[in-house]
Amino acid sequence: DAEVATEDNTSNGAAEDSYTGESLVEPTAPGRFKVVFQDTDLRLALWMLSTQGKRNIVAGKDITGSVTATFYHVTFEEALDAILRMNGYVFRQQDNFIYIYTPQQLADEMRATEELIVRAFRLYYVTAADAEALIAPALSEDGSVALTPAAGSGVAPDTISAGGNSYATGDVIVVRDYPTNLDIVAEIIEGIDVRPQQVLIEATILSAKLTEDNDLGVNFSTLSGIDFESLGSASTSVGNTTAGGLASTELKGVRAAGVRTGFDTISGGMT
């Protein structure tokens, strides 16, 4: 709703809005004002706003500056915020009074009115040490953190202690800080202490059963590259462990423990 006048002291090109050379704060509607300042002392501008808006404004001696601006149809708060912001100040309302501060003064006063409180956060998926590092940026200068000790690991057998006090308890982090900082810490912990993603692995177990009906042995025709059955001659060097020597027609599927041949092989052996 607010408009700032251009350097020629006009706004929206309207002749009737030309600047007359006087500082002005006048009502234009219930709760709305026209504000005109030309290199006006900041303390005088605050006094004029206070008078026309019938509000109590308190400014310390260190609040100084000047204002050059023109606003139309603005509320009291909008005009006050604008002229303070251009001079680097802020305001805070308490009861029926409006106090003017520098940003640092306001931060110090708000901090002085807050009390340090303590909150405990139980962790389920993230360690206390990791959480401490992640919440550190959200703590104030007065904030502090306490952690549960990490669970003992790799405890060697010992006849004296044997790690009797090394309990694997859940992690807890205790934070002492101002309420505004603790709210930020709570949001951080809520975002990091989450269940990790899990991968589902399915396995199928196959059972193989062998009986006496299975033909077991070595197929030498495959191993040596020679078809013993097509050689057309008997070999007593290939024998069944129970039936003795076999004819060539019986060599198919033979179960044997050794092979000796009665025929010449080509140079280089059997391939």
Image (tube, rainbow, N blue to C red):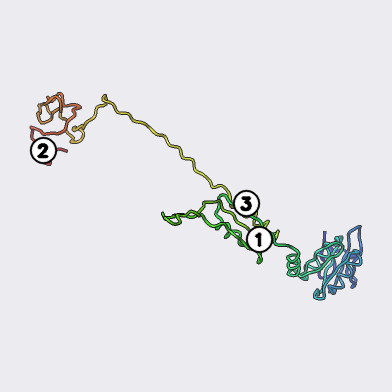
Indicate the secondary structure of the residue bearing disc 3. helix
Q: Which mark is residue 176?
A: 1
Depth order, front residue of 21/149: 149
Question: Which residue position is annotated with label 3?
Answer: 190
Q: Quadrant of residue 43?
A: bottom right
Q: What residue type is disc 3 on?
A: Glu
On residue 194, the disc is none
The amino acid type found where label 2 is placed reads Ile
Which of label 2 and label 3 is nearer to you? 3
Percent of width and height locating residue 97: 86, 65
> Residue at point 47% right, 55% down?
163
74 left or right of 253? right
Q: Earlier in the sequence, mark 3 or mark 1?
A: 1
Q: Residue at x 42, y 55 (%)?
A: 159
Is there a contact, CB below 8 Å, between mark 3 and mark 1? no
Judge the density around disc 1: few (<14), some (14-19), many (≥20) Cα neighbours within 10 Å. some
Are the two marked residues, 2 and 1, in contact with CB atoms closer than 8 angstroms? no
Identify the amino acid type marked 1: Arg
Residue 202 placement, left or right of 19: left
Q: Residues within 10 Å of mark 3 (few under 14, many from 20)?
A: few
Task: Report how far apart the C-alphas of labels 3 and 1 lie in the structure.
Answer: 17 Å
Location of mark 2 (residue) = 266
Question: Image point 42% across, 34% down: which residue?
Answer: 204
* SS state under label 1: strand
The disc, 2 or 1, on the residue closer to the chain's N-terminal end is 1
Q: CA distance from mark 2 to mark 3?
A: 80 Å
Residue 81's image quarter? Answer: bottom right
Instruction: Measuring from the top left, give residue 137's x and y in whole percent.
Output: 62, 62
Give the position of the C terminus as an image quadrant: top left
Q: Name which residue lies at 11% across and 34% down.
A: 260
